[in-house]
Image: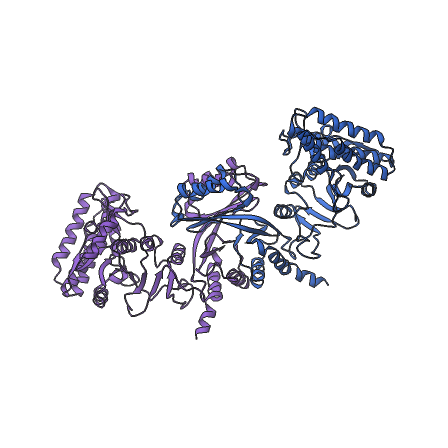
Chain colours: A blue, B purple
């Protein structure tokens, strides 16, 4: 049995709905379908989720909002028309549902936002089930409540409750095709609560794990996951196989294909993930698995992200002070700041963190506390850092992986601000100035992947 | 004015005493002399300090110890005979002093050990002053108490009290040559307390800083500091100049020429240090200075040390947990463990520390605490790690320094367990398996220094 999740662009229009139906029909194993809200049909289009956020804002501000309800519902009506469905009743129900939610949560803005956002997926799942039935399939909309997706009651940041998995296991016995909206669950008190970023992927992953799927298929709009961001390198190499660990390290630092938190449930359940293209379902896609043969390709991918800074402190004989590092991290923790990496030397320590966590006053307060409490000789913050991750299961034992990277940087005349290798068995981290990041990623790509290409051609 | 400190091998015999006198006479600037206890005269010889430790142990155990007193005093008597000195009175005083100390501290073992150890330097300074006077110099023994070296009252781990520096400044006005024993000071309650490892170097450095010397000369038995341990590479390159920071990083990890703590006073006072050879005083030696021209030689040296281990923990979504790293370091701190470096990845963190800190029960307790308090997925300790430091002021801005190192490792087929670059501006740290450390150091030496040599020849 397969759980197939279709992302926003895969369910954005009538044409896309037809492709999805074809994909479901082509494989009897695809029994549980998770859908996103309709995404963009063309570059300048607006996602339904964004329309819903505007709607929620209009309600909160007391502005006129009927036209926004119309705009949302029109997206579904447009799909229904394109599919030649007699769906006016379904469409009317959507409108009524939005109005009822606005009335119910008028004075509770966080809940209103969550309920309206979630309706994007909910309505699309209803429409998809309706459409599949019109094609003669035994398809049924199942709400997250009926399926058993119960979550913590934190609007916008739902976390799955462990009991849900047992409830979800009953889905396995379902004889017909089940269509579940992604992105949200229900709190134990009956409220709609949305997942954080990447929410529909999280739903798909939870459902696959709970229902004990053989495969979790994640349909998107690219043929595969690439070894590097395609906006940085032209026609980069496609990945046939990647491990959970590799995917997680990559998705953490700039790979937007798959949100890292979404992998946890399938990773823990040991269910392989296949990322496929709705627009080209024949392409083999990329498999995310527990183990891969990495003898020939020690490095799986290169990811990068900008917007980091480094808090550098130095103090003579720092290494004699038991507890120095702990105290420095404590100060950051007191301010709610998370850090990426904290390399330390004999008299120096640096803490690399996302710079947006250091806003004006906080920055000064932290500097002052470090100065007075730790009596450092020097402290300065360096902004404009980019982190680059070279990720691969084969790296740990491959002599020369680091040499290739550093040689590539040297040849491209890029100064390495920081290297972190050794904590993770599957990644190596480099810090460079933000302005050098594109050049650095291309240099690394050429070093690790260009020869493989050349060999094949 | 110069403060000249002579190490154990420089004052081990009559012949060495003659060299020291010659060195003092050859430069009017050498007015303050700091001496160690007599060291080894030949490889199988025993240092006086070690004889004194044996003496203390015999006293503590209630064993016969007269023969040990004789053995200690005989070393000085031997020097006196070799110098044709009429020193029987001085020698008798030594014997009386040892007996008096044993009587005074018979029941306080820590104080006894400190007092006896310190006598090695103290008696040697008295003998040196006596000898210099016999040559017609105006030389005077000055005890640390008279000089003003007052320290904290921690036997074996004295730390200088800041007030001492003002007292020491009066030494500058001294018209004759002052001979001060190294290795110890006096607590405010009048007890002898020794410095930690490298103690006579510490005394020399404190005296130089306090007396406002122009140069602190450190006489030892090598022509210069080498860029790498001469036991690992044959005839390595000599260093003409090195900065305090470089010296400190090198001496921390395996460079035994200069103990790192000893540099602090002169570093803070901005006094240049010259390391010279008592047996070849004409050689220019190595200067330790605040700044050097590093354009042509970005790397100053390579040091290494073994006996490290790595505590590796992994936990899925670790990076989401604010405070994880701090808590891990807190557990180590609770156990009084200091760490060298704590690289962290997305789901992993490693803490590198000296393995001798993890004794049987403590290891298990720490593992258990990490497991239960931090709920990690996995924890294991990897023993047998060596750390290699590549040190140089010119590294920070030199593209390709890291590339050279990693290429050298790759060529020598050495797997890099860990790289830490970026916290310190003057060093890069590599972790390798202990069995690979010699090969690794030689590979790095060839990469950084062999070409420079080739150029010169």
Judged from this view, the residue extending furthest toward the front is A63
Q: Is residue A53 visible?
A: yes
Q: Is residue A424 left or right of residue A286?
A: left
Which image quadrant is residue A150 in? Answer: top right
Residue A118 is left or right of residue B214, and the answer is right
Using the rendered view, name the quadrant where residue B248 is placed. bottom left
Horizontal side of A19 relative to B339 (left or right) equals right
Q: Is residue B437 above or below residue A353?
A: below
Q: Can residue A185 be seen in the rendering of this structure?
A: no
User: How many numbered discs?
Assistant: 0
Decide: is B119 above or below A372: below
The N terminus of chain B lies in quadrant: bottom left
For the point 16% across and 62% down, the residue is B131
| B413 versus A252 height, above or below | below
Q: Tell me if residue B54 comes above or below residue A69 in the rendering.
A: below
Name the foreground residue: A377 vs B277: A377
Q: Position of residue A305 (x, y in %)?
A: 60, 49
Q: Position of residue A245 (x, y in %)?
A: 62, 46
- Quarter of the C terminus of chain B within the rendering: bottom left
Percent position of residue A144, x then y: 72, 30
Which percent across, then down, holds residue A191? 67, 26
């Amino acid at each position: 049995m397969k759980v197939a999740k279709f992302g926003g662009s895969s369910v954005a229009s009538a044409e896309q709905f037809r492709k999805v139906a074809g994909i479901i029909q082509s494989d009897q194993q695809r029994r549980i379908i998770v859908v996103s809200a309709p995404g963009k049909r063309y570059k300048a289009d607006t996602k339904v989720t964004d329309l819903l956020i505007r709607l929620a804002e209009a309600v909160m501000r007391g502005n006129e909002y009927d036209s926004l309800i119309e705009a949302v519902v029109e997206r579904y009506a447009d799909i229904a028309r394109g599919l030649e469905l007699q769906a006016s009743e379904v469409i009317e129900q959507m409108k009524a549902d939005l109005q009822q939610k606005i009335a119910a949560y008028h004075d509770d803005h966080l809940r209103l936002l969550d309920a309206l956002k979630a309706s994007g997926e909910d309505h699309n799942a209803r429409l998809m089930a309706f459409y599949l039935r019109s094609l003669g399939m035994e398809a049924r909309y199942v709400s997250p409540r009926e399926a058993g997706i119960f979550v913590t009651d934190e609007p916008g940041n739902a976390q799955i409750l462990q009991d849900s998995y047992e409830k979800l296991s009953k889905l396995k016995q379902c004889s017909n095709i089940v269509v579940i909206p992604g992105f949200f669950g229900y709190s134990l008190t009956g409220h709609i609560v949305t997942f954080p970023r990447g929410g529909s992927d999280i739903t798909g992953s939870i459902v696959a794990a709970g229902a004990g799927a053989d495969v979790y298929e994640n349909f998107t709009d690219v043929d595969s996951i690439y070894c590097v961001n395609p906006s940085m390198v032209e026609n980069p190499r496609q990945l046939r196989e990647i491990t959970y660990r590799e995917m997680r390290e990559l998705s953490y630092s700039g790979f937007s294909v798959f949100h890292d938190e979404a992998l946890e449930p399938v990773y823990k359940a040991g269910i392989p993930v296949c990322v496929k293209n709705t627009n080209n379902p024949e392409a083999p896609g990329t498999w995310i698995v527990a183990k891969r043969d990495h003898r020939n390709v020690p490095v799986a991918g290169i990811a990068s992200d900008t917007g980091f800074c480094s808090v550098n402190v130095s103090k003579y004989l720092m290494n004699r002070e038991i507890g120095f590092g702990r105290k420095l991290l404590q100060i950051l923790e007191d301010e709610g700041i998370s850090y990426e990496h904290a390399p330390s030397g004999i008299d120096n320590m640096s803490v690399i963190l996302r710079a947006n966590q250091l806003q004006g006053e906080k920055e000064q307060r932290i500097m002052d506390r470090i100065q007075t409490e730790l009596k450092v000789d020097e402290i300065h913050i360096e902004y404009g850092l980019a982190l680059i991750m070279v990720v691969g299961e084969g790296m740990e034992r491959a002599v020369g992986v680091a040499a290739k990277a550093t040689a590539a940087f040297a040849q491209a005349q890029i100064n390495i601000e920081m290297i972190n290798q050794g904590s993770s068995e599957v990644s190596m981290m480099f810090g460079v100035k933000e302005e050098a990041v594109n050049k650095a990623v291309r240099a690394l790509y050429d070093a690790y992947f260009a020869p493989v290409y050349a060999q094949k051609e």
